[in-house]
Image (cartoon, grey):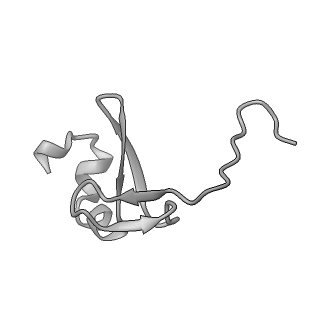
Amino acid sequence: MTTMGEKRVSEAVQVTCAQCGTTAEDVPLTWISSVERGRTLYYCDRCARDNLRSIEARLDQAWW
């Protein structure tokens, strides 16, 4: 039984890093997500580390 707002995912979802194109099954815990212009984008751990200051400053990806 799930509560309101809780989602169950029965299938693994493939995600792609918006920066380098790396793919992974499901969203690894080391990846980060960002909502830009209404779209949820995911970044792998390497791209997240390389651009951490820009991400924390909430700069658009174009400025990285």
Q: Is residue 43 above or below residue 4?
A: below
Quadrant of the rendered image containing residue 2: top right
At a point 77% along the width and 30% down the height, the residue shown is 4
Quadrant of the rendered image containing residue 6: top right
Quadrant of the rendered image containing residue 35: top left
Q: Is residue 12 above or below residue 56?
A: below
Q: In which quadrant is the N terminus drawn?
A: top right
Closer to the camera in the image, 53 or 42 = 42
At a point 35% along the width and 28% down the height, the residue shown is 38
Which residue in the rendered view is the most extreme toward the left? 63
Q: What count of labels does the image hold? A: 0
Q: Is residue 25 above or below residue 63?
A: below
Which residue in the rendered view is the most extreme toward the right? 1
Task: Please provide percent x and percent y for residue 41.
Answer: 35, 46
Task: Please provide percent x and percent y for residue 55.
Answer: 29, 49
Task: Please provide percent x and percent y for residue 21.
Answer: 25, 62
Image side of residue 52 versus residue 64, left or right: right
At a point 46% along the width and 67% down the height, the residue shown is 30
Task: Please provide percent x and percent y for residue 7.
Answer: 69, 41
